[in-house]
Image (cartoon, coloured by chain):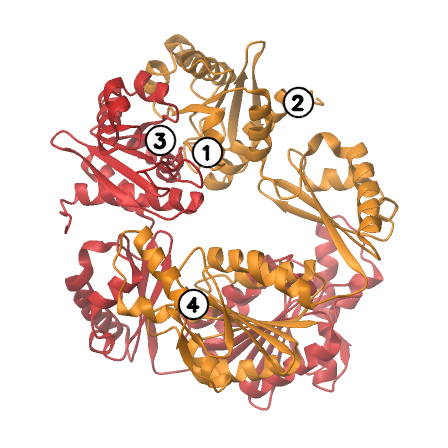
Chain colours: A orange, B red
């Protein structure tokens, strides 16, 4: 099965929005062995859209479009579809209910404009949208599949994952199957990871290994093809074991799990409670921890002690120490962690203090300098980190380093150095 | 002049890399009034690339390709070009020098493979690459321009900025210029915004108006074309005034400014200090405020009072009130805002409490219910919001609602209802 992706919207052509939808759908399709032969972006113009539909329908077995399904005048995908398939719009009662429900849930009134979102092409099956009001459409004509989805990433992704992919798997049966495994590492740069793994050919023996770095670490993606599920699993397991024997200490998760989920699971299992005192990360560490549903079980409280006064008043940091070593110091990181642990009664206190930039550097404290403190009933220590000069990336990296320090403490993984 | 962008590379089709190049070039071209009519992604396959060149050359006056210029076997853009234009590769001495220089600078040895990067199509002018080894090509045939660039973003961007755009400006003399204006709204759904603005034709009088919704609100983008800068500015000003007269209270920024920047500026100007007490937003509100460099001037501290104990202990919330109304109530929102204001000595206290889901709903408190509290020296009040059932989006929307409540308080914009 060959696929052709069409993203619709002027904002993509003029570069106001980066087209992340095509990458997401491309990845999802290639996971299930559907080859994407082309992906295109066209503006909100009827003639162009129709000619693009024509080309896609000719060249591919599967066409997926995103965008242009909103309620306003510049959203014309719906009318392009009816024109292309020479059909008309009909009201779908189930979808109308969904739309009404969506508005009731938000306590807002349903307008005539919104009701129009329940109109679907007569030749289509609606794809329900649990995150928004525009349904998608699934059309089958001439042995080809044409899928129309909204352009809002969160809505589109949910519809791809919960409906489109399962349906396509049913339709697209091939003899070879593919399996993938993600191993997520943190605290080790890509180049060192690469060196430690040694010969990639020896390691993978015909499988594919990709290095996917981002600000939180490096993901390793292993892809194998084989004739059966169990052959795939065995190959993957073998490669995983080899990788773990070399860099296992840096691997925090199998699959797309976030580090805040990993530590959340360990804390939940052990019935431990965590409290956080943040200076430089400014609430981002607490925010990541509380992104996880159920975090109230183990996240007791957080304090964003941005001012020195708040460090002294809430966390009982010692004023003389503050004076002597400054707020960005291992001493204060430890006192913050100890302080938040003491006032909260939590099992573990975790703290951050640093200079995230772009301003705030002093003679011997550069932008990017961060100390992270951790105290539990047995130990209290701080570690030094030196990140770059991008404020927001530093926030991400510092929060990741704090979570990783917590993970290593919980799993008793000693530092190498 | 109409442009067609082609990005070449399997990694883009399978979603391993997000195509940021097309957005960058699209933005650069639209700045100089060159309309991008289509942008496409194709894999490293000769037949597909040739057919794509054909289509692009037919439909547009300007074709820009990126990717596939590296030294390895799967980079075939160079051979696709010679085939398409029925020409051959010739060695360019200047480019060879560039490549040699590049290797000397990095202390690496020049291989035969790398020397091949100095081969350019006979019908082209080379575009030098100061950040890497693959030159680009500029080809003019049949009154059309065909530009070939490497896919590495940093190399491509430099070549676009320093060579391609200046050359295109010389070629593309048009009398009309274009100007754009972004107005950012929040707290009003897209459909109601659309209705309040009334007839779009009347409002814009030939200009273009786009609605760009996201979880933080709806951006309005107005694009005008005119013969001079001042004509553009006048048209934009006229439309902006009309829009402001209808929905001005919901507009927080002109341009791409974030709401946390808007409120940060007002707080700085007035020399006011803010403290935040978060329950449901879990640190995200503090994190957004501290994303802004210089926020330590006005952000005094934050408390993430996730547990009830922390609400009582740090914020001095009344236990009886907590018992009687529950943590998710207007009473507690107000007490939290008052509490954080009192302990911090800040001018304004801002608080959030709610049920972000997916779990935690009770009989009369659904997922998505959020109260935001605000206290300053004169007033103390709470507002109720009902968001959806996605935890992370609710966090974003609740923090945006809190910042907007703060903005309206600072600017004395009364609520409509």
Tell whether label 3 touches label 1 (CB within 8 Å).
no
Label 1 marks a residue whose chain is A
Please give the residue where the numbered disc 1 appears in the rendered image: A290
Is B409 situated above or below B61?
Answer: above
Horizontal side of B280 relative to B114 (left or right) equals: left
Residues at marks 1 and 3, CA–CA distance in whole angstroms: 10 Å
Q: Report the label total.
A: 4
First in sequence, mark 4 or 1: give its number: 4
**Residue A301 percent across, percent down from the top left:** 41, 23
First in sequence, mark 1 or 2: give its number: 1
**Residue A98 percent across, percent down from the top left:** 39, 60
Question: Which one is in front, A348 or B117?
Answer: A348
- Between marks 4 and 3 in the image, the one whose residue lies nearer the viewer: 3
**Residue A95 percent across, percent down from the top left:** 41, 65
Q: Residues within 10 Å of mark 4 (few under 14, many from 20)?
A: many
Residues at marks 2 and 3, CA–CA distance in whole angstroms: 29 Å
Q: Residues within 10 Å of mark 2 (few under 14, many from 20)?
A: few
Residue B151 in sight here = no
Residues at marks 4 and 3, CA–CA distance in whole angstroms: 36 Å
Q: Secondary structure at mark 1?
A: helix
Please report the residue visible at 59 percent of the width from the left and 85 percent of the height from the top.
Answer: B57
Residue A78 in sight here = yes
Please report the residue visible at 62 percent of the width from the left and 20 percent of the height from the top.
Answer: A409
Please give the residue where the numbered disc 2 appears in the rendered image: A411
Disc marking residue B279: 3
Q: Residues within 10 Å of mark 1 (few under 14, many from 20)?
A: many
Q: Secondary structure at mark 3?
A: loop
Please give the residue where the numbered disc 4 appears in the rendered image: A11
Horizontal side of B139 relative to A291 (left or right) equals: right
Horizontal side of B280 relative to A85 (left or right) equals: left
Q: Secondary structure at mark 2?
A: loop
Residues at marks 1 and 2, CA–CA distance in whole angstroms: 21 Å
């Amino acid at each position: 099965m060959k696929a052709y992706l069409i993203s619709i919207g002027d904002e993509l052509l003029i570069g106001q929005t980066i087209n992340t939808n095509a990458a997401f759908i491309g990845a999802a399709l290639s996971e299930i062995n559907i080859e994407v032969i082309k992906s295109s972006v066209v503006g909100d113009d009827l003639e162009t859209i129709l000619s693009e539909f024509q080309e896609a329908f000719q060249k591919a077995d599967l066409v997926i479009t995103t965008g242009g399904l909103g309620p306003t005048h510049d959203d014309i995908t719906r009318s392009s579809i009816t024109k292309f398939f020479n059909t008309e719009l009909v009201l779908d009662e189930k979808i109308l209910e969904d739309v009404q429900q969506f508005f009731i849930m938000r306590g807002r009134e349903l307008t005539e404009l919104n009701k129009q979102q329940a109109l679907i092409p007569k030749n289509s099956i609606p794809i329900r949208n649990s995150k928004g009001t525009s349904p998608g459409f699934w059309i089958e004509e001439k042995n080809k599949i044409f899928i129309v989805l909204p352009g809002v990433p969160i809505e589109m992704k949910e519809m791809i994952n919960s409906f489109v992919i399962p349906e396509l798997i049913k339709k697209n049966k091939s003899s070879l199957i593919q399996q993938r495994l993600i191993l997520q590492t943190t605290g080790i740069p890509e180049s060192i990871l690469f060196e430690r793994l040694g010969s990639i050919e020896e390691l993978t023996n015909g499988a594919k290994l990709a290095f996917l770095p981002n600000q939180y670490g490096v993901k390793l993606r292993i892809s194998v093809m084989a004739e059966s599920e169990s052959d795939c699993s065995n190959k993957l397991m073998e490669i995983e074991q080899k990788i773990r024997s070399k860099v296992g200490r840096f691997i925090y998760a199998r699959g797309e799990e976030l580090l805040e989920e990993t530590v959340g699971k360990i804390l939940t299992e052990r019935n431990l409670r965590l409290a956080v005192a943040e200076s430089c990360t400014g609430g981002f560490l607490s925010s990541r921890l509380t992104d996880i549903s159920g975090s109230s079980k183990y996240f007791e409280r957080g304090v964003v002690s941005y001012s020195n006064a708040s460090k002294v008043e809430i966390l009982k940091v010692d004023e003389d120490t503050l004076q002597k070593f400054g707020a960005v110091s291992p001493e204060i990181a430890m006192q913050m962690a100890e302080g938040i642990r003491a006032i909260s009664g939590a099992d573990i206190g975790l703290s951050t203090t640093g200079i995230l930039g772009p301003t705030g550097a002093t003679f011997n404290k550069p932008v990017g300098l961060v100390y992270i403190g951790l105290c539990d009933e047995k130990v209290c220590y701080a570690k030094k980190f030196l990140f770059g000069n991008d404020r927001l990336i530093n926030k991400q990296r510092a929060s990741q380093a704090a979570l990783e320090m917590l993970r290593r403490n919980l799993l008793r993984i000693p530092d190498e150095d």
